[in-house]
Image (cartoon, grey):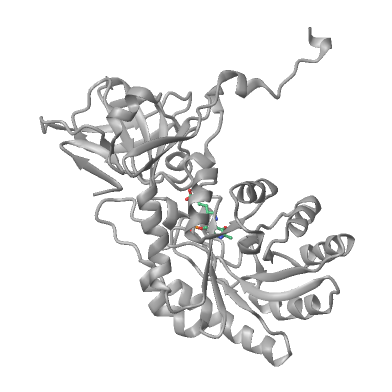
Amino acid sequence: MSGFEYVDDELCCDHVSISRMATKIKTPFYLYSYDTLKKNYQSYVDAFATTNLSICYACKANSNLSILRALGEMGSGMDVLSHGELFRALKAGISPAKIVFNGNGKTREEMAYALQSGVFAFNVDSLNELFILNEVAMANNTVARIALRVNPDINPLTHPYVATGLAKSKFGIPIHETKDVYQTASTLENIKVVGIHSHIGSQLSKVELYLETLKKIMPLVKELRDIQIHLEFINLGGGIGIPYQEGESMPHPKDLSELISSLVKDYKLILEPGRSIVGTAGVLVARVLYIKHTHKKNFIVVDAGMNDLLRPSIYGAYHHAVLATKHIDTEEMMYDIVGPICEEGDFLARDRQMPKVKQGDLLVIKDAGAYGFSMSSNYNSRPRVSEVMGIDGNDYIIRERESYEDMICRESIPDILM
Ligand code: LLP
């Protein structure tokens, strides 16, 4: 038994009772299961055992150093999209030769840092960026290895905010323009064309979408070969969804490998999974502050808010909520779970039928390992919460809760205001 499971009515994370943890760690806090992380990572490795696959974990999903370190130890590379993410990946000991640099707005300074660090490749998002990268590489006396990010114009059937492969999306080079851009790239002195990249969206529920993408990309790869542009790798980005709702079914990496492995067999395949690696490996633990009944609703007011977990507020995302300690009485009620932030959009769950909850109970908001802490903020001057990892019967603080001093330490009051 490991991961998140009830033992004698107590929810445990890798054999440690969450209630017990909450006696010494101030709520709210994020809690990660090392075991689940490993299983999720391994599911990709096993599924693609016979494919030349490199996994570049998308560290935007969760960039805590211990998460990066743990995945690095398992063999993962990283997808980074900012100076800060590259800095973190290197600090966690990830070899730059396993790092791809993404993003549609890389600055010259970020390019220089990535070149000096020796990253594996840049995924270039526009012709304009390509020219700048060439200049920066020249100034640094080096050559930038690149893939072009292709926008294949595919509807990924996901939330509009994370649908990135549609023609109207800000990401990638329209597929019909890509051959020309490759030709231009191949003439630039400080650019070496090595691959092709596409990431059509996140929380994808169908692996057939990757097949659709490949059907658009592979003819282009062949055309490029015909004009002596030979690619080393095909990078299909991240995107495999996770089941947030109970009983929801989502594809497994095996489904993807069965569908696409034979099509990419002549190339190295790169995937950049984020959510499917870390999503189910994390929860947000919150304490019930108040129960409030109005004539319209029953509210559970917890000590975690939209600044801690933003996904419900901005995407209307569903996260399953459970009690850390199961109640014996089975009476159920319909609740909204809300935070202490001064906005009506500050909710973690709406209209949830669940066992009657009491003040002081611990609530566990599930599947919050991806885009949970990494999207958290200090809104309402609330310190960012601590992060904890359960590993084989022990719990480790992997990020301390911020102090109030931490929150103001970069601010100053000019003399004129004194
Ligand atoms: N590669 C690229 C270029 C990406 O932009 C992303 C995610 C990934 C890989 C990883 O995708 P994943 O495997 O995690 O689906 N904040 C949103 C998700 C934003 C995704 C951004 N890009 C959320 O909470 O749902």
The extreme bottom residue here reads: 226
Q: Quadrant of the C terminus?
A: top right
Residue at image coords 19%, 40%: 7
Name the side, left or right, on which 54 lies relative to 351.
right
Residue at image coords 25%, 38%: 11
Is 205 or 193 nearer to us in this picture? 193
Residue 182 at what x, y percent from top left? Answer: 74, 78
Residue at image coords 39%, 55%: 38
The extreme top residue here reads: 418
Name the side, left or right, on which 38 lies relative to 20.
right
Residue at image coords 73%, 89%: 228
Residue 324 at what x, y percent from top left? Answer: 26, 33
> Quick check: 216 above or below 279?
below
Name the side, left or right, on which 28 lies relative to 231.
left
> Quadrant location of residue 5?
top left
Q: Does residue 241 appear in the picture of this structure?
A: no
Residue 109 at what x, y percent from top left? Answer: 80, 50
Is 298 or 301 nearer to us in this picture? 301
Q: Does residue 49 appear in the picture of this structure?
A: yes
> Quadrant location of residue 380?
top right
